[in-house]
């Protein structure tokens, strides 16, 4: 199966503007040329097998000087490259004269039904061109994602303990939603099943006199007759507006050239203005930016000057290269100036995750952020845009910063993160939260945790309080699913232990919760709506990430489960049904 998208090669011209591309298969290509001080130019070229072609492209001067980030990025950064349709093994070439050039397969001008049929005999859906904005440079897709693998079955007699760190991030679901809405499947490596499950709200009762409560439920699997599914739900202590601590926020905004698109800088501005409107008296906001250099735009400003904060946000413009590490240093310096004990002290980074200037090593930035988090300044990352997006970098920065990682693709998503979920986004109620599930070998033959691959913790480190884990915010819910082969479904087959520290604490507390046989449902139909929604979301993720378990967790079964059990009156549940249907269509199933 060919990957349709902006796979490309890149070349720089010499001083006279000459350029060349070699070792090209036959096909139709689009040459996109960018040169500082000139308007971008396009030219379509059709190569025949065994032939070369000479091209001359004339450039017109532009009043706007393009920044370094407006230039095409090296194709070597891309996680995957696609070959043009109808590739030929023979070697062809293109040469010519112009500025800097990027060569890529061209897109069809119109959607047609002339595409080849798949193995089932059904027409495959036509590819859709992603959004294109005037003045945007056409470059290789340099998005980066990390494949953490898929958890396999564990034999209970050999290993009865399952240990992992808590996770409340939701970026993977939002990224997948954007890709699917644009008409193509997300990269398998971008899909983290637990983030699909935890995107949704669950009606777990709030804890009383404790940081959080644990709720468990189990039911027969809709995918395999001999298996059951266990859902473990954790509910964080809620905090009302009156109870919330004062928030001292430092916005760090990436203003490099790659952020110039409306779905990046335009959406950043709208999102931050909305966040500012949710803050209350006693809260403060500071604003820093980074591009080729860093800049302190706004010193800590109270909500009595809300209009001043709005103006500072609205005046942001994208240009230049990306000095992320220097920007982080400035933001933390600003946060320390305004640091107040017993308050929320947080840096919020808005970026596409790219970094190409200065100290860009991922490990160096993570070490610095971990130090600041230990000192009481946490960090959240908010992702924007596509094309050069660095998912892994954004996720890891938030992990080390004891904060959250979200991806915002629409203004509605911004309101969800900074409106309804503001308490959980800002106020941490417990840190280094670890979960250990102890399965009884007499009742459980084997088990597998669905997702949380990059949250694995060694069983021996459950009580090692030096090992970093996850954080949970006020009112947050966390859900984990297990697939089980049970010997005795009527037994109390599992004990869940949770270990955590207070937000500023160093000593951990621990509590155990035993599964009650009364929580075992006789059928999936008798399980709660929350249970069925979580299973449907996990089934979608298992298919999108090309899990080996998708052979039983099929997209068709996910579709049936969603249509039969989810509410079409609930906006989020209706969206999940639509995404499952879109996935089935794009997969030709």
Image (spheres, rainbow, N blue to C red):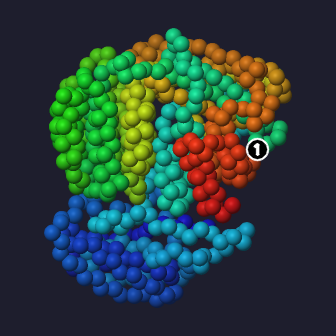
Frontmost residue, 366 versus 217: 217
From where the camera sits, is residue 123 visible? yes
Instruction: Work out whether 137 lies above or below 61.
Output: above
Report the label total: 1
Residue 235, percent from left and from top: 54, 24
Task: Name the residue located 28 percent from the left edge and 46 percent from the top edge.
Answer: 269
Quadrant containing the N terminus in the rendered view: bottom right
Q: Residue furthest front?
A: 569
Task: Name the residue located 53 percent from the left edge and 13 percent from the top edge.
Answer: 208
Few, some or many C-alpha atoms within 10 Å of disc 1 (few <14, some 14-19, many ≥20)?
A: some
Quadrant housing residue 198: top right
Q: Residue furthest top?
A: 209
Q: Give left or right: position of 502 versus 306.
A: right
Residue 507, percent from left and from top: 46, 12
From where the camera sits, is residue 481 visible? no
Quadrant housing residue 71: bottom left
Instruction: Work out whether 463 lies above or below 80.
Output: above
Task: Name the residue located 29 percent from the left edge and 76 percent from the top edge.
Answer: 41
Residue 446, percent from left and from top: 76, 32
Q: Give left or right: position of 49 versus 319.
A: right
Residue 92, percent from left and from top: 46, 83
Q: Helix or strand or loop: what does disc 1 sit on?
A: loop
Q: Which residue is mark 1?
A: 223
Frontmost residue, 480 versus 291: 480
Frontmost residue, 514 versus 56: 514
Quadrant containing the C terminus in the rendered view: bottom right
Instruction: Work out whether 249 lies above or below 135.
Output: above
Task: Name the residue located 62 percent from the left edge and 55 percent from the top edge.
Answer: 581
């Amino acid at each position: 199966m060919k990957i349709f998208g902006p796979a490309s090669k890149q070349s720089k011209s010499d001083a006279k503007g000459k350029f060349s591309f070699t070792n090209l298969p036959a096909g139709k290509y689009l040459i996109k040329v960018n040169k500082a001080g000139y308007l971008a130019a396009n030219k379509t070229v059709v190569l025949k097998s065994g032939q070369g072609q000479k091209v001359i492209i004339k450039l017109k001067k532009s009043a706007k000087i393009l920044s370094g980030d407006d230039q095409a990025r090296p194709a070597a950064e891309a996680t995957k490259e696609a070959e043009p349709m109808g590739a030929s093994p023979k070697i062809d070439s293109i040469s010519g004269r112009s500025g800097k050039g990027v060569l890529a397969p061209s897109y069809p001008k119109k959607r047609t039904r002339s595409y080849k049929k798949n193995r089932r005999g059904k027409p495959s859906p036509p590819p859709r061109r992603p959004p294109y904005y005037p003045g945007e440079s056409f470059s290789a897709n340099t998005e980066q994602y990390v494949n953490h693998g898929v958890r396999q079955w564990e034999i209970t007699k050999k290993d009865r303990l399952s240990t992992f760190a808590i996770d409340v991030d939701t970026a993977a679901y939002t990224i997948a939603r954007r890709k699917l809405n644009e008409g193509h499947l997300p990269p398998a490596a971008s899909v983290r099943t637990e983030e699909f499950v935890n995107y949704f709200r669950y009606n777990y009762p709030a804890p009383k006199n404790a940081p959080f409560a644990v709720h468990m439920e189990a039911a027969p699997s809709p995918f395999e007759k001999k298996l059951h599914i266990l859902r473990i739900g954790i509910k964080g202590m809620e905090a009302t507006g009156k109870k919330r601590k004062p928030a001292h926020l430092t916005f760090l905004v990436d203003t490099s050239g790659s952020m110039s698109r409306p779905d990046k800088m335009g959406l950043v501005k709208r999102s931050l203005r909305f966040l500012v409107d949710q803050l209350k008296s006693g809260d403060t906001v500071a604003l820093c930016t980074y591009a080729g250099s860093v800049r302190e735009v706004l010193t800590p400003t109270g909500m009595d000057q809300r209009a001043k904060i709005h103006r500072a946000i609205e005046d942001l413009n994208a240009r230049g290269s990306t000095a992320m590490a220097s920007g982080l240093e400035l933001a933390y310096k600003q946060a320390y100036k305004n640091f107040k004990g017993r308050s929320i002290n947080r840096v919020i980074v808005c970026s596409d995750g790219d970094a190409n200037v200065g100290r860009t090593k991922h490990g160096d930035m993570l070490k610095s952020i971990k130090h600041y988090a230990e000192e009481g300044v946490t960090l959240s990352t908010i992702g924007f845009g596509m094309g050069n997006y660095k998912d892994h970098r954004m996720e890891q920065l938030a992990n080390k910063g004891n904060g959250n990682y979200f991806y915002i693709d629409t203004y509605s998503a911004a309101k969800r993160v900074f409106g309804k979920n503001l308490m959980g986004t800002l106020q941490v109620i417990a840190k280094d939260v670890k979960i250990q599930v102890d399965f009884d070998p007499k009742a459980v033959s084997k088990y597998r945790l669905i997702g949380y691959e990059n949250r694995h913790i060694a069983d021996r480190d459950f009580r090692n309080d030096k090992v970093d884990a996850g954080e949970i915010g006020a009112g947050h819910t966390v859900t984990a699913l297990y697939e089980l082969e049970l010997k005795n479904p009527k037994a109390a087959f599992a004990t869940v232990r949770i270990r955590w520290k207070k937000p500023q604490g160093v000593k951990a507390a621990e509590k155990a919760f035993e599964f009650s046989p009364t929580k075992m449902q006789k059928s999936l139909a008798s399980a709660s709506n929350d249970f069925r929604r979580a299973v449907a979301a996990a089934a979608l993720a298992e298919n999108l990430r090309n899990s080996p378990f998708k052979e039983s967790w099929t997209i068709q079964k996910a579709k049936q489960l969603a249509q039969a059990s989810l509410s079409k009156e609930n906006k989020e549940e209706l969206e999940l049904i639509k995404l499952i249907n879109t996935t089935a269509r794009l997969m030709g199933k």
